[in-house]
Image (cartoon, grey):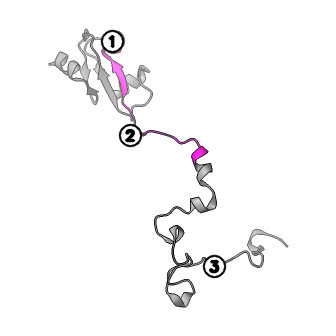
Amino acid sequence: MLSLNTIKKSKGADQKRKRVGRGNASGHGTYSTRGLKGQKSRSGVSGLKKLGMKKQLLKIPKLRGFKSPYPKNQVISVKMINKNFKDQETVSPETLLAKKLINDKAAGIKILGKEKLTVKVKFAGLKMSESVKKQLA
């Protein structure tokens, strides 16, 4: 009966990896199957050139630029705080999430704004710009 544990590889499917540059007794010592001289025998020469892949590599569109592994801050403006909060309320990640002003409380949250802060609220666990810090002081 044929099942996964009874399947065997066909003859010749398993080949040992060619270990190059491990002494002359291995049969692949001294020049390590590269020949004597020339560009292809030197180190640092890409093997892709001799395989004819350079043109293919150049045709492929590459993803340019840099993408930071760290998430960006979610921005909350002073205008939004004035609109959604009353006096003596606390502005925290939990309250912002409850009022659906942010999507995720685990990501960074920063209060920005050129507007005046008209409500007297307390801030907890948030980053804020210098202009907002000056208004609170």
Residue bearing the label numbered 2: 70
User: Is residue 84 or residue 75 the one in the foreground?
Assistant: 75
Residue farthest right in this picture: 1
Number of other residues with Cα within 10 Å of mark 3, as a class: few under 14, some 14 to 19, many 20 or more: few
User: Can you give x and y, in whole percent of width and height, for residue 85 in the image?
Assistant: 33, 13
Q: Secondary structure at mark 3?
A: loop
Task: Say what amino acid the circle numbered 2 marks.
Answer: Tyr
- The structure residue drawn at horizontal position 36% and vertical position 13%, both measured from the top left corner, is 84
Q: CA distance from mark 1 to mark 2?
A: 27 Å
User: Label 1 amino acid?
Assistant: Lys
Q: Is residue 49 magenta?
A: no
Residues at discs 3 and 2 in contact (Cβ within 8 Å): no
Any mark on residue 79, and which? 1
Q: Which residue is mark 3?
A: 16
Q: Secondary structure at mark 2?
A: loop
Q: How packed is label 2: few (under 14 Cα within 10 Å), some, or many (20 or more)?
A: few
Percent x, y for residue 66? 42, 40
Q: How many marks?
A: 3
Give the quadrant of residue 9.
Answer: bottom right
Q: Is residue 101 above or below residue 34?
A: above
| Residue reaching furthest to the bottom | 25
Q: CA distance from mark 3 to mark 2?
A: 43 Å
In the foreground, 20 or 12 = 20
Magenta span:
58-83
